[in-house]
Each structure stands twice: as structure tokens, then as C-alpha cells.
Image (cartoon, helix red, strand yellow):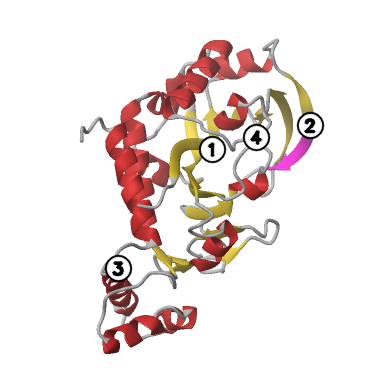
Amino acid sequence: MRSILLFILIDFLKIKVEDTLIINSLFNHPLLYYHSKAEVLLSDRETIASKEVMQYKGIHFEFANELLYIKFKPHYYFNDDKHNANDFSIYDCITVLEEFCVMFGVDPFKLIVVNIEFGVNILLPKSLINVKDFLACLIYHGKNEFYADRKYLDCRFSHTMNSRGVANTYKMIKCYAKGIQFPEYVDINTLRFEIKSNRRNYIKSLGIDNLSFLLELKTFDTLSDIILKEFEALLIIDEVAKPQLTKTKYDNFRKKLNPLFWRKLLMSDNRNAFRLHFNKYYNCLNTSETHLKNDVKSLVLTKLNKLKGVQF
């Protein structure tokens, strides 16, 4: 099996606070210092409110309209707000969140999670594939095509679109070159696979309502399962694998290495055509001695079983 390192971590949280006592306590907390002040348009598109932002070691506290939103990057906090590239275990994450609650004297049950980003960092051996080439090989997550990020060229993201062609933030999949982002802290060939959402319905489906749920190991079991599930939905063009097929089947397999083949399927009258050929494609790849997606999947499963205490 090809050697790949895997780490699961929470990258970003947005927390909503409605409790007046907590809001007042934090607004006057001696550890917080001024960051900025601005006028914001509320969700009714008519009311303008004043927003005052305070911070502590990269944690932003946004006070506006009798509400408080806390933007928290636990991994950055762990590294003194410098980067999120190194190893950051589940226990490290829980420790950081517990420290936050104790330091500011807040009840985690009253801190509502309204935005979350979580994922894995994967070190791709250079003998296997360059991280940029790997990103180029990612073409779909489910039926959603991967797009390049205009601001970050070494990032790909996938999501559904609403009727107006706007990105649906219910669930977004991101893959990017973490090593290129932070070459001074991690191997340049490190890849990040990430899931993000700012929809309460999705976050609740993960078994997360408030911050207290992220202080429990069982919640990370669920997040691990979701990472595996979403990874399974990746369509990766693998021209290196050597499937053991007859000439006719191999010729058909080679057609599936062209992204245009998959775009045409999405335009087909047969709604099941994409899934049918997706399964056929990986059935062919699974006849290979090894292939990229299968190797990473095996390592993900090993990691998940360790988290759940399964003994081998």
C-alpha cells in the first residue's frame, strides 16, 4: 500500500450566542481587545445595525443586533494563530475547545454551531503523484463538478447550485494543496480534503447542535464516517492504474478517462447514467493491483477504526 499520512480535524467554527448574560460578559471581558467597527445590513435588507468586532488570539467576537457571533479556528489557535498545517489530533481539538469555554466562562450548551469546516490532511508521496497533478485529476464529487478557485489556484471546490446559479452552501467539498499554502510548516505535497457548511439542517445531521457536542469523542466518529462517505463520492481520473480487463472492456474504460465523457452523461435523458458508469469505472479500477482512490480509502478506514477502538 502506498504510504499516506492522515489527520482529522476541525478547521473552522462559527458560533451563535443569544444568551444576554454571556454576550454582556464577553463584551466586557478583559482578555478581548478592539478589532474593528462597521455598519451592517441585517437579513431583512432594510435595517442597518452597528457591528463591533473584538478578538483574542485570532478568535473574532462580532457583537451586533443583540447577538454575538464567534468565529473560531481551533487549529490556528493551537498554533498561536500562525497556521493550520501541522498535526492536530481530535484530543488536541477537544482540549482547545474546553480551554476556550473555561477561559471565557461560557456554557458550551449555549453556544450554537452555525458554520463548520472539517477534514483531513493527506501527505501524498512524491513517487505517487504531485499534489497539483492530483488536483487536476479530481473532476466530480457526486454529480457536482470540481471548479478552480479564482483566488487560490491550487484549490478545487464542488457544490450544488440553486436556481439562480449561486453556490449552495448547504454542503461544499474542498480539496487544496495545503503544502503549497504553508511550505514552511508542512511537506509541500500535502493535500487537504475538507467539508464545509453554514446550514443548521446539515450541521444537525452531523449530530451537532451546540459546542458541547464537539467535546465528545462520539461526535468525531460521526465526522469521520462523513469524511469517508464524501470521499467515496469522488470521481478521480486515474491514468496510472492498470486494470486487468479484456481489450474491449479496456477500450471502454479508457473512454471514461476523458472528462467530456462524464459531462455528456449529465446531459443524458437517463438520470441514472452517471451513477451507472461511475460504478462501472470503479469496478474496472478495482481489478488493478492498486489504484489511488482505493489506497487512500483503505487508510481512511484504518484511521476510522482506530478512532472507534476497533482492534486488528
Disc on the earlier residue, 4 or 2: 2
**Within-10-Å neighbours for mark 3: few <14, some 14–19, many 20+:** some
Q: How far apart are the two marked residues, 4 and 2, measured between alpha carbons? A: 26 Å
| Secondary structure under the numbered disc 2 in the rendered image | strand
Q: Is residue 124 above or below residue 133?
A: above
Q: Nearer the viewer, mark 4 or mark 3?
A: 3
Residue at numbered disc 4: 83
Residue at numbered disc 3: 288
Task: Using the image as rendered, state which of residue 63 and residue 196 is in the foreground.
Answer: 196
Identify which residue is drawn at 65% across, 35% down.
83
- Which three-letter amino acid code belongs to the residue tagged 3? Ser
- Which three-letter amino acid code belongs to the residue tagged 2? Lys
Q: Nearer the viewer, mark 1 or mark 3?
A: 3
Q: Provide the residue span drawn in magenta.
A: 36-41
Residue 303 percent location from the top left of the image:
34, 39
Q: Nearer the viewer, mark 4 or mark 2?
A: 4
Q: How far apart are the two marked residues, 4 and 3, measured between alpha carbons? A: 38 Å
Q: How far apart are the two marked residues, 1 and 4, measured between alpha carbons? A: 11 Å
Is residue 212 something that shows in the picture? yes
Q: Would residue 176 appear left or right of 311 to someone viewing this image?
A: right
Disc on the earlier residue, 2 or 3: 2
Q: Would residue 258 appear left or right of 287 to someone viewing this image?
A: right
Disc 2, disc 3: CB below 8 Å?
no
**Within-10-Å neighbours for mark 4: few <14, some 14–19, many 20+:** some
- Hey, which quadrant is residue 294 in on the image? bottom left
Disc on the earlier residue, 1 or 3: 1
Residue 170 percent location from the top left of the image:
47, 52
Q: Nearer the viewer, mark 1 or mark 4?
A: 4
Residue at numbered disc 2: 37
